[in-house]
Amino acid sequence: MIKGIFPLEKFKTLQTPFYYYDIDLLKKTLDIVKAESEKYNYHIHYAVKANANSRLLSIIAAYGFGADCVSGGEVQAALDAGFPSNKVVFAGVGKADWEINLGLDNDIFCFNVESAVELDIINELAAAKGKVASVALRINPEVDAHTHAKITTGMKENKFGINLSLLHGVLDKFSVLKNVKLIGVHFHIGSQITDMSSFQDLAIRLNDLQDKLEARGIIVENLNFGGGLGIDYYHPNHLAIPAFENYFSVFHRLLKLRPGQQVHFEPGRSIVGQCGSLISKVLYVKEGETKKFAVMDAGFTELIRPAMYDAYHRIENISSDGELEVYDVVGPICESSDVFGKDVELNKAHRGDLLAFRSAGAYGEVMASQYNCRQLPKAFFSDSL
Ligand code: LLP
């Protein structure tokens, strides 16, 4: 079994559970994102929701990327980390007035607007400040992302975006509303998408939409395709960096751009997913009647993805070379859904062994909670242990 390369001796001195980030891998991933996106002059806005750890944010900001935010808190975190406000995009179906005002005060690049009523409110708040807000319409393209139902966003029945059938009504509003300016269209069809045909469908859908917009005399400057590129949860060691080359080339091949149009993406998971692991200690090896349990000191409070989306995370016993045995790996939380994996093969586990839950860099730390009055764990970084 190939194990991640972890500084075990140092880990033994740290209080578990904790998140561990491989900064070298993060930078290698960012180098590739930069090189591949620059080939086509595509713009990258890192999706802060995937991981808002301030150290990671400042590393990503230093690459010159922008930020994709879905709350006022994320806008502030992005600005604090050094993302320039003119590269911040702000999406979300429910933006509170103070959040919109924060965006207006900082002259962010764009509000990704999800409904006609939201457009009215942004117009009203911008007018009160004597400003004109740049907006992109988030359109629900009715493209199937072929991913888990809870992370699918681009279907008619999802709450996100403006339905295609309602788009013309929203476009009509721009001739009346004087404090909003249409600068683009935005899409995000879902997350952990590994089937490139979904992105092909999205690009083709955009081409159809452009024809329709053009028929109304509208050519928008910015086309934003959101995030969604998946990672390989089964092979974090062999496939540590997602296939950004294929991903961007799908859009390059299929998009029929009008002169001067700018293309934007909002990758989250694909940038930070593989560089993070959750490190947790075996509290007990509990023998059940039919099962053997590795009872961990981390639970769904530190990594909720298995409980929430039935997600698979590779689990490695980094303390043991013993024979492989089969365990249900469970947390200490008083809920039967607090299970990381059933029938998991691990090197023989003992009390005190450290287990690594791999590919936890995205939607791990950022979704942690204090349920059961637990403390939020710390994060450590490979370059500063
Ligand atoms: N842009 C928008 C508008 C989004 O809603 C999202 C993610 C992204 C970009 C980034 O998507 P990514 O590249 O990371 O797939 N907690 C779930 C994932 C929720 C994704 C929400 N939106 C999980 O753990 O799988």
Image: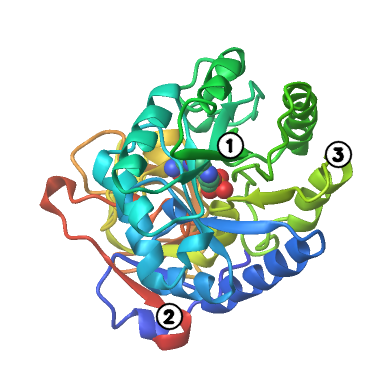
Quarter of the image where the C terminus is located: bottom left
User: On the image, numbered disc 2 is attached to which residue?
Assistant: 8
Quarter of the image where the N terminus is located: bottom right
Nearer the N terminus, badge 3 or badge 1? Answer: 1
Query: Cβ of disc 1 within 8 Å of ligand 1?
Result: yes
**Closest to the observer, 37 or 243:** 37
User: On the image, numbered disc 1 is attached to which residue?
Assistant: 188
Per the image, label 1 sits on a secondary structure element best described as loop
Per the image, label 3 sits on a secondary structure element best described as helix
Q: CA distance from mark 3 to mark 1?
A: 17 Å
Instruction: Judge from the rendering whether residue 251 lies leftward or rightward of residue 268; answer left or right.
Output: right
Per the image, label 2 sits on a secondary structure element best described as helix
Check contact, mark 3 vs mark 1: CB within 8 A: no
User: On the image, numbered disc 3 is attached to which residue?
Assistant: 254
Residue at 36% in and 43% down? 126
Horizontal and vertical percent position of residue 289 = 31, 35
Residue 365 visible, this orientation? no
What's the residue type where badge 2 is placed?
Leu
